[in-house]
Every structure is written in structure tokens, then in C-alpha cells.
Image (tube, rainbow, N blue to C red):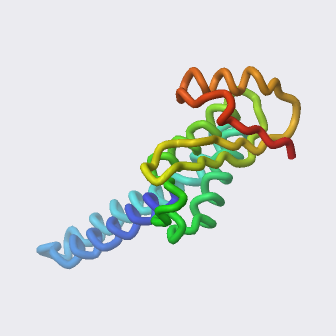
Amino acid sequence: MIVAWMKGLVIYLILSGLVMKMVPGKNYEKYISLYMGFILVIMLAKPVIMLLFKKDGDVENLMDKVDNYLSFDVGNISDINEGITYYELGVGEDLKLELIKNGYDVSKVTFVGDEKKNVMSVTLYMTGEFDEKDIKKYINDVYNIDYESIYIVRR
């Protein structure tokens, strides 16, 4: 989200600079500049506004996502022995967010895959109170992973 916001901001600044260079006369330059300034202020305020009007849990989830993306090591993705793909990483993040939404305190979700990139096991790192059977049943129902391949680590 932050990266997309920054890309949009850079593109807007480049395009607004081009538009200002192409203004045919000085008469309209101040009006176009004022209008573009308003749009820039709105674009700059968008992340702050989103944080202010979201629930507390949503802000924490957003900050967790930012931390995950900033600390993510891209070099490990291509490791064929791990068998983990972008898809599986996305599924892990979705599973984590879904469990958090249901009231569970999940700090990390990891997948282990084989050389054919099939999911062999899932490990959840959790704290707080939870029923292990309910969580395993949910993962089995939604992701079709065997109960024996789902590991839950209490932290």
C-alpha cells in the first residue's frame, strides 16, 4: 500500500511538472498550479486519513504488513529447496489476517513445500487463548491441508 502510494505520488509529480511546462500562457498558470497543489495535498494526506478512520486492529494489521514487506528477503523466494512461491506467501498472509480477524493472536505463518511446490505443512506461531482443533479444522476446510501437516506453536 505504501509503495503504491509513493509510486502514484512520484508519477503525479512528474506529470504535473510536464503539464506546467505545457501551459500555453501565463494567465492560466497560477490557476493550474493552485489546482495541482490541492490534488497534491489530498494525495499526501490520504495515508494519514486512512489511518485515522480505521479501527485500532486494522491499523495494527496495516503496520504488521508494512513491517513484513520491509523486512522480507526476496533472495529466499527463488530457493528451489524451500518450494515456496509468491502465491503461497500470499496465502500465508491471508490466513494470518483471517485468523486475526476471528480474534486469534497470530504472529507468523510459514509454509513448507516440496520440489514440486506443493504445500507439505503449515506452521502457525500464536499467543493467547485458542482451541487448536478449531484452528486446524478451519485450515483443513478452507485450504485442504491435512490435520497432521498443521503445526501450531505457542509463544
The residue nearer to you, when weighing 61 against 15, is 61
The residue nearer to you, when weighing 25 against 88, is 88
**Residue at 50% from the left image edge and 54% from the top image edge:** 84
Classify residue 141 by image quadrant: top right
Residue 29: tell me if it is visible. yes
* Image side of residue 29 versus residue 103, left or right: left
User: Relative to 88, does residue 9 appear above or below in the rendering?
Assistant: below
User: Relative to 9, does residue 20 appear above or below in the rendering?
Assistant: below
The residue nearer to you, when weighing 95 against 62, is 95
**Residue at 52% from the left image edge and 59% from the top image edge:** 2
The residue nearer to you, when weighing 12 against 55, is 55
Classify residue 82 by image quadrant: bottom right
Total residue callouts:
0
Residue 64 locus on image (x, y percent): 67, 52
Residue 90 locus on image (x, y percent): 50, 46
**Residue at 67% from the left image edge and 27% from the top image edge:** 147
Residue 133 locus on image (x, y percent): 76, 22
Residue 81 locus on image (x, y percent): 52, 61
